[in-house]
Image: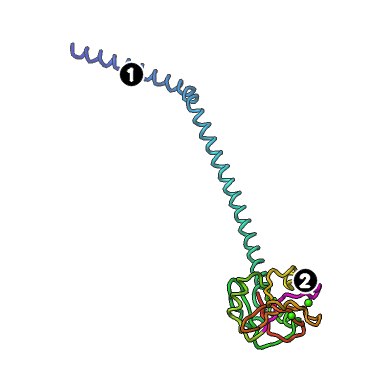
Amino acid sequence: MRFILSTLLILLQASIVFSQSCLESKQLEENCSSYCFKILRPVLDHAASLQNHINNDDSKKIDSQSKLEKVERQLEVLQGKVETLERVNCKPSAGLQSKKFQKIGSKYYYIEENESVNWFRAVHRCHEMGAHLISLQNDNEFQALKAKLNVDRNYWTDVNDLSLEGEYLSHTTGFKAPFLNWYPSSNPDNKGGNENCVNLWNRQKTLRMNDAPCSSLLNFICEL
Ligand SMILES: [Ca+2]
Ligand SMILES: [Ca+2]
């Protein structure tokens, strides 16, 4: 009997403790609603801010991507234009394709050693090929080209003083010829008052520049 009473007492105390524990837990739960909200609010705000950043970054990525695609389209258009210009300006025309241009130094030349024509015809023949008469820029170009030429022939250049006696211009650019290499002492002599076109002149197995009548029939060199 004493044992039973002790057991009931223990169970009653345990029940009271359990009831108090539940009450505290409930109070904590209610209190936590506002407390936890205060604690978590900055965290939630920060999370929202991060999400906005991510969304904004996505927008920027999309915007950058569209700009990149636009630039790529513009590059494709430009590439097409460059290829067209190359075809028009740099590629051999139909008449030119049968001619053999060779790279000498940094330029491409067609050396005509069979056909002899006057200076105007030579200008025209080069234009037919999409090219122009040689327009030598410096001694390096001249020496490189000269090494490939037949020293028994004479070749027209694009240099002339047709517009003003003694003023040697490049027919290609319309500006003063940047490179001249006259045959020593006698040239340019405008012999007979009628030498207005300049050629590479074969004398003593070397080629130098000479002014000659434009009607002379000479070989010529075209340059791309
Ligand atoms: Ca002259
Ligand atoms: Ca002369």
Please determine whether, in this image, residue 61 is positioned above or below residue 127.
Answer: above
Residue highlighted by disc 1: 18
Residue depicted at x 65% and y 70%: 86
Closer to the camera in the image, 18 or 12: 18
Q: Is mark 2 within 8 Å of ligand 1?
A: no
Residue 127 in the image: state x and y as whole percent. 72, 78
Question: In whole angstroms, how far apart are the C-alphas of marks 1 and 2?
Answer: 118 Å
Mark 1 or 2, nearer chain start = 1
Tell me where residue 108 sits by quadrant.
Answer: bottom right
User: Is the CB of the residue bearing disc 1 within 8 angstroms of ligand 1?
Assistant: no
Q: Quadrant of the N terminus?
A: top left
Q: Which quarter of the image is occupied by the C terminus?
A: bottom right
Label 1 secondary element: helix
Kind of residue at disc 1: Phe
Residue 130 visible here: no
* Residue located at (45% from left, 23% from top): 32
The answer to which of 14 and 142 lies nearer the viewer is 142
Q: Residue 174, image x and y in percent?
A: 75, 69
Identified at 53% across, 38% down, the residue is 51
Name the residue tied to disc 2: 167
What amino acid is at disc 2? Glu
Quadrant location of ligand 1?
A: bottom right
Residue 170 colored magenta? no
Residue range of the region highlighted in magenta in the rendering: 154-167
Quadrant in which residue 169 is drawn: bottom right
- On screen, residue 99 versus residue 176, left or right, reads left
> Going by the image, does 196 lie left or right of 110?
right
Where 70 sits versus 5, above or below? below
